[in-house]
Amino acid sequence: METPWGALPVSDAHIHFFSHRFFSALAEQKKQPVAALAPVLGWQLPPEDPLELATTWTRELDRHGVSKAVLIASIPGDADSVIAAVKAFPERFRSYLMVNPTAPDASANVERALDTGFIHGLCFFPAMHCYSIQDERAQKLLALTSARPRTVVFVHCGVLTVGIRRKLGLPSLYDMRFSNPIDLHAVALRYPQVRFVIPHFGAGYLREALMVCDLCPNVYLDTSSSNSWTRYEEAHLDLRAVFSRALDVAGPGRLLFGTDSSFFPRGWNAAVFDAQTKALYEIGVNGETASKILHDNLNQLFS
């Protein structure tokens, strides 16, 4: 892809795979048919077959020149959707499964999904499901990943807003008590062989996320989304300052570029790519470091 440094390979560490099952779950909460969601959202609803959605994403990434991407199954229990995508396009996609450790069947479902070989990471959203990442139930799932080399653990920290729920008028009863990256510190130390990813630079907990990165070499940051959390900072950090601080502490080898893309017709969110590459270029990052952040680090994460 063309970048401020010239042509470089680009991979995306954070794309939500909004499957038909994902929308069906929301429609069930709204007590409406799935088709009724489209006019409210102004989005294209995906076909029932996840392979068709995977094909659409492949074409979209080809159009933008994105070589690889991580697809996130964005509700617990939606492993089959991303598994279908990875099976069809194993060189293009890696997949993460959202998990809820408080569900009674969580361990069995996660073990079954990991055993397929097509799930490459688990996504924990402690604030969403109201538990601590140090909770014994979460530890059971972490033990499953630690027994499987190269399985990534993604832990959402900081501010959590789900735009689609807001658009549909659905409540988001999250609990930010469980959002602090500091909670991950002891866990990352307990599982040094597991690679942990904190998205959005900690989403308002940049300082704490950097502290954990400094103390735990197995913790990575993903850069995804507009990072609008910067408005909470006293100095109102911009992306240049965020990247500078992250590079100073975590170094260029533990930053993973991502967009947080999710729905069509918008598709791949090129505006995030443009803003982030502009910020990196303006702070003087060279082409070698840019290549690591935009592509190489994600490849090495799964090696």
Image (spheres, rainbow, N blue to C red):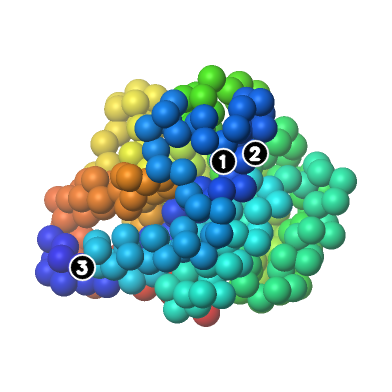
Residue occupied by mark 2: 25
Say which residue appears at 36% left-offset and 57% top-offset: 257
Q: Position of residue 135 (x, y in %)?
A: 79, 44
Answer few, some or many: residues within 10 Å of disc 3's Cα (few below 14, many 20 plus, some between 14 and 19): few
Say which residue appears at 30% left-offset and 27% top-offset: 235
Residue occupied by mark 3: 1
Residue occupied by mark 1: 23
Q: Earlier in the sequence, mark 3 or mark 1?
A: 3
State the residue in front, 238 or 275.
275
Q: Residue furthest right?
A: 104
Answer few, some or many: residues within 10 Å of disc 2's Cα (few below 14, many 20 plus, some between 14 and 19): few
Q: CA distance from mark 2 to mark 3?
A: 36 Å
For the residue marked with disc 3, what is the amino acid? Met
For the residue marked with disc 1, what is the amino acid? Phe
Q: CA distance from mark 3 to mark 1?
A: 32 Å
Nearest-to-viewer mark from 2 and 3: 2
State the residue in front, 284 or 110.
110
Q: Are marks 2 and 3 in contact (CB under 8 Å)?
A: no
**SS type, badge 2:** helix
**SS type, badge 3:** loop
